[in-house]
Amino acid sequence: MARMTMIEAIRDAMDVCMGLDENVVVFGEDVGYFGGVFRCTHGLQQKYGRSRCFDTPISELGIVGVAVGMAAYGLRPCVEMQFADYVYPAYDQIVSEVARIRYRSAGQFTCPIVIRMPTGGGIFGGQTHSQSPEALFTHVAGLKVVVPSNPQDAKGLLIASIEDPDPVIFLEPKRLYNGPFDGHHDRPVTPWSKHESGEVEAGRTVTPLGKAVVRRAGSAVTVLAYGTMVHVALAAAEDAGIDAEVIDLRTLVPLDLDAIVASVRKTGRCVVVHEATLTSGFGAELAALVQEHCFHSLEAPIARVTGWDTPYPHAQEWDYFPGPARVGRALIETMEA
Amino acid sequence: MARMTMIEAIRDAMDVCMGLDENVVVFGEDVGYFGGVFRCTHGLQQKYGRSRCFDTPISELGIVGVAVGMAAYGLRPCVEMQFADYVYPAYDQIVSEVARIRYRSAGQFTCPIVIRMPTGGGIFGGQTHSQSPEALFTHVAGLKVVVPSNPQDAKGLLIASIEDPDPVIFLEPKRLYNGPFDGHHDRPVTPWSKHESGEVEAGRTVTPLGKAVVRRAGSAVTVLAYGTMVHVALAAAEDAGIDAEVIDLRTLVPLDLDAIVASVRKTGRCVVVHEATLTSGFGAELAALVQEHCFHSLEAPIARVTGWDTPYPHAQEWDYFPGPARVGRALIETMEA
Amino acid sequence: MTDTPRLSLHVPEPEVRPGDTPDFSNVAIPRAGSVPRPEVDADPKSMRDLAYSIIRVLNRQGEAVGPWAGTLTNEELLEGLRDMMTLRTFDARMQTAQRQGKTSFYMQHMGEEAVSCAFRKALLPGDMNFPTYRQAGLLIAGGYPLVDMMNQIYSNEADPLKGRQLPIMYSSREHGFFSISGNLGTQFVQAVGWGMASAIKGDTKIAVGWIGDGSTAESDFHAALVFASTYRAPVVLNIVNNQWAISTFQGIARGGSGTFAARGLGFGLPTLRVDGNDYLAVHAVAKWAVERARRNLGPTLVEYVTYRVGAHSTSDDPSAYRPKTESEAWPLGDPVIRLKNHLIVQGVWSEERHKQTEAEILDVVITAQKEAEKHGTLHAGGKPSARDMFEGVYAEMPAHLRRQRQQAGV
Amino acid sequence: MTDTPRLSLHVPEPEVRPGDTPDFSNVAIPRAGSVPRPEVDADPKSMRDLAYSIIRVLNRQGEAVGPWAGTLTNEELLEGLRDMMTLRTFDARMQTAQRQGKTSFYMQHMGEEAVSCAFRKALLPGDMNFPTYRQAGLLIAGGYPLVDMMNQIYSNEADPLKGRQLPIMYSSREHGFFSISGNLGTQFVQAVGWGMASAIKGDTKIAVGWIGDGSTAESDFHAALVFASTYRAPVVLNIVNNQWAISTFQGIARGGSGTFAARGLGFGLPTLRVDGNDYLAVHAVAKWAVERARRNLGPTLVEYVTYRVGAHSTSDDPSAYRPKTESEAWPLGDPVIRLKNHLIVQGVWSEERHKQTEAEILDVVITAQKEAEKHGTLHAGGKPSARDMFEGVYAEMPAHLRRQRQQAGV
Ligand SMILES: Cc1ncc(C[n+]2csc(CCOP(=O)(O)OP(=O)(O)O)c2C)c(N)n1
Ligand SMILES: Cc1ncc(C[n+]2csc(CCOP(=O)(O)OP(=O)(O)O)c2C)c(N)n1
Ligand SMILES: [Mg+2]
Ligand SMILES: [Mg+2]
């Protein structure tokens, strides 16, 4: 197994899929010749030609809109939004079209497209390069929503997403692109090339959608996290010295409710973390489900540790970001509640 | 006090505000000469002239985009989306601009606009005339979100919204436009003109944002509802013969958490109802908040009764719609849990 | 600049409103046969004028004249007449069915039948339309069974879309008809994507996008033109200008540009404007544009000048915003009558045969209707199951939907 | 049609890539002075050609020639030169500051200084710009203090935007500069709304929208043109075509249309194309368009032909996608050098005074920088408070945010 950055793993996933299925096409802003501003598509145009990997005009609506038409034809477009913060011009196409075409045509037309987008903060990107809009997609029936937390998952989940018969919103935590972050922004980062979770299987490796994974077994409290926050949660558990069970959800829709319920029934406590704003974030859904399905096991209220209900600020990035200290505090409070 | 339909009350609110403040302007698709497809702006162009009430091109993006510029100038645009289902083309302007201009300009520019939109089902409108997208706005910091359930509130809340210094998403349950519905779709409707809650105060009557109201006092279980669902909840409580306290939230952001907590602490049980799809609906936020703030008072899991996680179907409308039977069942189950 | 006048807002208004006398004398109508027909591979720059004119074939005497004439045989024209008459009869019956409560909603095509009926004949099997709700002529002229259309309109147990979709929001992959969206505009850029896919695969199929005059203001219109122009997608982009967008006259969407066709000039596209009530002209232009796409010469933008004679939908009453007699004053006439007259002039048709065909068609439509009603109507008889509501959200039903279906008890 | 060829996708590519020799010989550059100047109230139809030409004033000899010359005095031009030089020096210092870690991000204007600096001089107090991130010249030429710009770039304790916004995403109502959005395009249609508001109120102020070549593909561009054209809004709509959108050459956004200016033709707008590296030409065109808006004659679309000499931003390296020497081959030269040469030809400037002024400006910029750095830089010294993060989301802080602020302990 080779070590890869998350960027390389994502590129490798597209490479594998383009090699196996000539209906897979890749496009987006700066995605073609240059290979993407984060270089996730670097080399694909050279390898597969300009008809299968190309630059587009700066129109997120257009990118998704033409992808819908291509999918109706029979292709499998895997498109890039340059940042998740720029997906909104395509929101109508996603909500009204992508998510509903199979349903409203009773299966005559389908929309197996993947919309990749770098998400989350931690790079001093300010309010337009830091957002985590996952909850704006989890509310839309017909979409699947995926957030990997390491290179192997990024590759395996992206291959699963491209091969999936339904549309997938694929959120890539950009703080993890080049290094695992390990939860503390103020400590040196081990690059993926030196990190044990930088190992990535070669070829067609598939991580099925809808399956969570326990990243750290524990018995005192369950932490539900995804993406960057998995690393924060692990750091927080370590720092706070709490026997927390950290679950990496990987897929938000469909959600691995069984894994969640099994863990919370065992621990009796639950902390939910995400970077997006609190109100109506995906954490609300998780808390609602957990209290419903584990009511009689719960010994403390479910806590949510999230970004604050403000736009993502520039200078105050690390005040905004729910880091290990805040998560740790929530763990302790939940244990003491 | 005169009796009015909700449509008349909404029109009256705009009329009052246009009369009091010449910076109030009203526009949207078919809003000018014709007075709106639901007739909410009927007569306003005639009364205030074409510069203050006019038809627009069919571009929701354009409607909101020019409203942002007008607000920056100093006007107070109150614009209409023909249906809430058609707000998505304007979503980028709403999320990236409307919601954030005060914040990102440190108050140099503000965006006191109201975006009105008919919402919800119950009129056999199928998947594109029935949606309840409130949760897609409650997640966006900087917006206020309002849903009235009767003519007096529609008027009072709309006046408060137009006068508010911040942007307001104003969702008008179209099932209530002409008659109160009373919860059962298969029984005759009392028109607002004969209905006691059809009474509307004349002139500038203001219902403050952020204040919920108890529609039915009770001690057994708290029902949290808004818009059309308030009527369903009342009918369900009656039908199921349960001593439910029904709270009409009226404003989702800012939320009257105090009223909610006070009630649930008293009843120890809570049912949340809305018409939008379940996953990541606003009910998730309500459930998350209630379990957090009332954990030790809760005697049963908080139940959510909502639209299913599918697009809004046409023929199966009343199978989809969370009617009194489903809400009643949840009340009973919650009492028995 | 101290003597600067005060600014004021210009809000376009139609020249007449209810109570006024309709007057279309300001609408310039070129003589039939007077607009040149460029070669399909001519430089778009050489044909910019076509965006400001109107291509017409049928003259007042019912003769087919000029360079755009001659794309159809009399037999084909007779079939076209039948298609339009069928669509009109179908509309009339379904309007009534809606008033009888057999469906929730209906939208008719009165006055615009030629546009979709004639265009359809220029396509080959495998081509794909991305229509709006006012192109049922594509289905009727393409042989989609009337009874299937009605089953959907009634949302009955035989509804091919299982009751999920609004009436008239048809879908038929087999008939080259993409699932209609209720959200205006979205299909226009999807058509471009379909065409790009065909080009990527080295196929020979082309796509056709459809949009109304009012909806050209939507963002999808712009995205469609940008992508089509950049990638020279094999697509025909059709704007049906029926003068109205619900209560809003076309001047609001068109603004200061002379025509909707002119929008194409900013993208370097060949752009034609055609008499949408002239079956022969529509077909000739369709054929030209389809050939361009098919020969990999790229996209064409076409504006069909027509008039929405009926209400916008069964929820609309146009007498509130336009003179009742406006449609009679419309200078391009009625497409059915014009084609009928042409065929009579050609000596292959007569008033009697027309009447007789009318009766025949009514019979066919009523037979289909009876057949459909056996399967139920919106509030009576067979209906799609509540179970169907949960199917097809995803290819496989995920656990949370299974749970919800169980809760629903279906 | 059985002999139909297989379709293929056309993907536009620039003529040269890294390693190739830059070649702009295909860019048609009209002689300075050769493009006519219509009256501001002339019919837009009469000036369609201007969308395909380039208005230029400064010729190779540094003389101002033709009908567009003469809008500025030598004193004004000297001030303009100073503005451009200040912007260039400011950029250079801030680029370096970014590399030193004093800020997270920077975007420079190299090669495009004339566009925003000259345009600013055509406006009156109270007019409002809706800029992108590459029009800091509007602020510098409008007298906004350099130190305030730097305070924001450093996100320090004196940052007028309290650390909330990215560096360079300025906002100054007082200086007619609307809060910059990171989301491309949104401001373009907002400018139209501001102009409409001014017209609704019977005011005399006008609005100016700015957008990049690449961003014209966004939906907001279309909405802006639709609304501006329909309501004849008093607005100038500026497209800055600097040939590149990050790594994407302008051919991708422009597609088959000859120019970006041509987009305006589809809306019936007067549409001008101008040499963006010619301070005099930019000012003359700005003055013309501003006068049209001010006299309630409606919107004008202007394309500035220029070249992005530097990287897109401090996160970008253009050598990966274009020849290193491409900027040197750019046929419209450098705006600072061209204006300098003109002023020397006019006899009011010299190489020595230029050098001396360069040194003076550097001094001014360094002084401002020292002043700003007293208030801190991104990772050192004074910073905005975490409390500020919670303020200003709403006019009054709602209870849920108060709770969160308490939780944050600030
Ligand atoms: C995104 C969106 N906005 C608004 C509507 C409401 N609406 C339905 S039809 C219509 C008018 C469309 O006019 P036009 O495009 O001219 O088509 P026509 O009905 O004349 O065929 C409007 C505004 C919608 N369906 N979708
Ligand atoms: C909605 C949106 N999509 C994508 C981006 C990412 N992005 C930032 S700048 C840029 C290129 C813009 O090019 P152009 O409009 O030509 O302006 P220039 O940078 O050349 O001044 C892109 C794609 C963005 N900021 N917003
Ligand atoms: Mg129309
Ligand atoms: Mg550019």
Image (spheres, coloured by chain):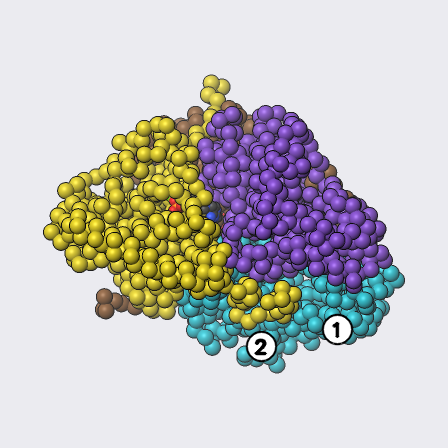
Chain colours: A purple, B cyan, C brown, D yellow
Query: What is the number of the mark on residue B262?
Result: 1
Q: Is residue A27 above or below residue B53?
A: above
Residue placed most toward the observer, A83 or A139 = A83
For disc 1, the chain is B
**Which is more foreground, mark 2 or mark 1?**
1
Residue placed most toward the observer, D371 or D410 = D371
Identify the residue at image location x=49%, y=40%: A37
Q: Residue furthest top?
A: D3
Which quadrant of the figure has residue C359? top right
Can you give x and y, in whole percent of width and height, for residue D261 in the image?
A: 32, 45
Identify the residue at image location x=31%, y=38%: D327
Q: CA distance from mark 2 to mark 1?
A: 24 Å
Residues tagged 2 and 1 counted as in contact (Cβ below 8 A):
no
Identify the residue at image location x=16%, y=45%: D62
Q: Is residue B28 above or below residue C273?
A: below
Can you give x and y, in whole percent of width and height, for residue C259 in the image?
A: 37, 46
Position of B228 with respect to B205 (left or right) is right
Can you give x and y, in whole percent of width and height, for residue C402 in the image?
A: 78, 45
For disc 2, the chain is B
Q: Is residue A332 above or below residue D48?
A: below
Position of D56 with respect to D198 (left or right) is left
Position of A94 with respect to D38 (left or right) is right
Look at the numbered disc 1 and give the secondary structure of its residue.
Answer: helix
Which of disc 1 and disc 2 is earlier in sequence? Answer: 2
Query: What is the number of the mark on residue B206?
Result: 2
- Taking the image as drawn, is residue A103 in sight? yes
Identify the residue at image location x=30%, y=59%: D364
Residue placed most toward the observer, C176 or A90 = A90
The amino acid type found where label 1 is placed reads: Ala
Q: Residue furthest bottom?
A: B1
Look at the numbered disc 2 and give the secondary structure of its residue.
Answer: loop
- Taking the image as drawn, is residue C169 in sight? no
